[in-house]
């Protein structure tokens, strides 16, 4: 009897030891991912820097939001000079998902502000408004937590405490070679939230095909966003993204249908002739949406002219 009791006590001690060890390991993984070298850390830092830029402006401003297809495609200074109001680049990361990106941007909208939403097709064609980084971003920043389904949020809570081997190897290499952690979004930003570094593509290029038009979920969510922006005294404007894409009938038909649906929600900025499909690959950086410094200048000049036609008498 005594032996059985001692055995049970020993099993309880082992269980508690395992639970404590697992808890310590998860906590260490969470700290790494959110505060040191994990991807959520860089998304958190990116958002926080942009939030500071937006909150520092007290006068009516233009907020440009979307995924990295907004972040890496504008020159805020050029647009600001043309429309005679401050511009803040709130572009984050496409896989954060439309349902998390929009409420995150909304909290920075003040009366008199204009919001320019530039969603890449990765976002517009999504069926539920969520992406692989929705949960990690929400957990790291505290933004959009109620937009992520509980089941997914629990899964991501567990996962954020378990760094991938690839991430740990990269961080170890960075510490050895650079003396610090680094990430995709760790480059310095301008005071307006624009990137200051061009990314370099490693693989071969191909022209992107757009195989469907905007989803019903995206339409509904953007319509809701317009109402939310207007309720806070702001105005919503939309823009098709610039994309290095093909000129097939399928791609053009899907973009035209997308444009028609978006125009029913809010003013839409795009070149009706090119549909914002770009054929010059030299102005693109590392993806079909990210532009080089020179490309951002040309794109911003176009946006500035289009905004002038709407905003200025």
Image: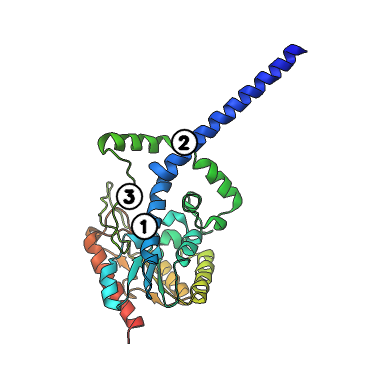
Could you tell me how far apart the alpha carbons at marks 3 and 1 are, in whole angstroms? 11 Å
Q: Is residue 109 left or right of residue 309?
A: right
Q: Earlier in the sequence, mark 3 or mark 1?
A: 1
Q: Is residue 305 left or right of residue 14?
A: left
Which residue is pictured at 51% across the width and 33% down the height? Answer: 24
Q: Which residue is mark 3?
A: 186
Could you tell me how far apart the alpha carbons at marks 3 and 2 are, in whole angstroms? 21 Å
Picture coordinates of residue 220 (x, y %)? 54, 68
Picture coordinates of residue 288 (x, y %)? 32, 57
Circle 1: element type? helix
Which residue is pictured at 36% across the width and 34% down the height? Answer: 169
Q: Earlier in the sequence, mark 2 or mark 1?
A: 2
Residue 28: mark in rendering: 2
| Res. 293 visible in picture | yes
Nearest to the eye among marks 3 and 2: give it.
2
Residue 49: mark in rendering: 1
């Amino acid at each position: 009897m005594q032996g059985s009791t001692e055995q049970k006590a020993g099993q309880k001690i082992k269980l508690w030891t395992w639970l404590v060890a697992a808890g310590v390991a998860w906590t260490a993984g969470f700290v790494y991912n959110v505060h040191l070298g994990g991807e959520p850390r860089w998304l958190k830092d990116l958002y926080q820097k942009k939030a500071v830029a937006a909150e520092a402006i007290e006068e009516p401003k233009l907020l440009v939001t979307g995924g990295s297809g907004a972040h890496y495609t504008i020159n805020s200074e050029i647009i600001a000079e043309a429309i005679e109001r401050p511009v803040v680049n709130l572009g984050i990361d496409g896989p954060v998902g439309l349902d998390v990106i929009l409420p995150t941007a909304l909290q920075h909208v003040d009366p008199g502000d204009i919001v320019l939403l530039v969603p890449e097709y990765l976002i517009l064609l999504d069926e539920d408004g969520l992406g692989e980084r929705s949960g990690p971003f929400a957990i790291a920043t505290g933004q959009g937590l109620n937009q992520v389904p509980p089941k997914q949020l629990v899964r991501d809570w567990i996962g954020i405490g378990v760094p991938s081997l690839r991430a740990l190897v990269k961080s170890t290499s960075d510490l050895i070679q650079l003396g610090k952690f680094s990430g995709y979004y760790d480059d310095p930003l301008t005071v307006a939230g624009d990137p200051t570094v061009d990314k370099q593509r490693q693989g071969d290029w191909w022209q992107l095909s757009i195989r469907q038009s905007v989803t019903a979920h995206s339409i509904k969510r953007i319509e809701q966003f317009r109402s939310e922006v207007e309720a806070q005294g702001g105005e919503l404007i939309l823009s098709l993204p610039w994309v290095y894409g093909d000129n097939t009938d399928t791609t053009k038909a899907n973009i035209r249908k997308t444009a028609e649906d978006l125009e029913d929600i809010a003013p839409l900025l795009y070149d009706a002739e090119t549909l914002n499909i770009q054929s010059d690959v030299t102005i693109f950086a590392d993806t079909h949406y990210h532009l080089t410094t020179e490309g951002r200048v040309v794109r911003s000049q176009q946006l500035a002219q289009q905004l002038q036609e709407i905003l200025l008498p």
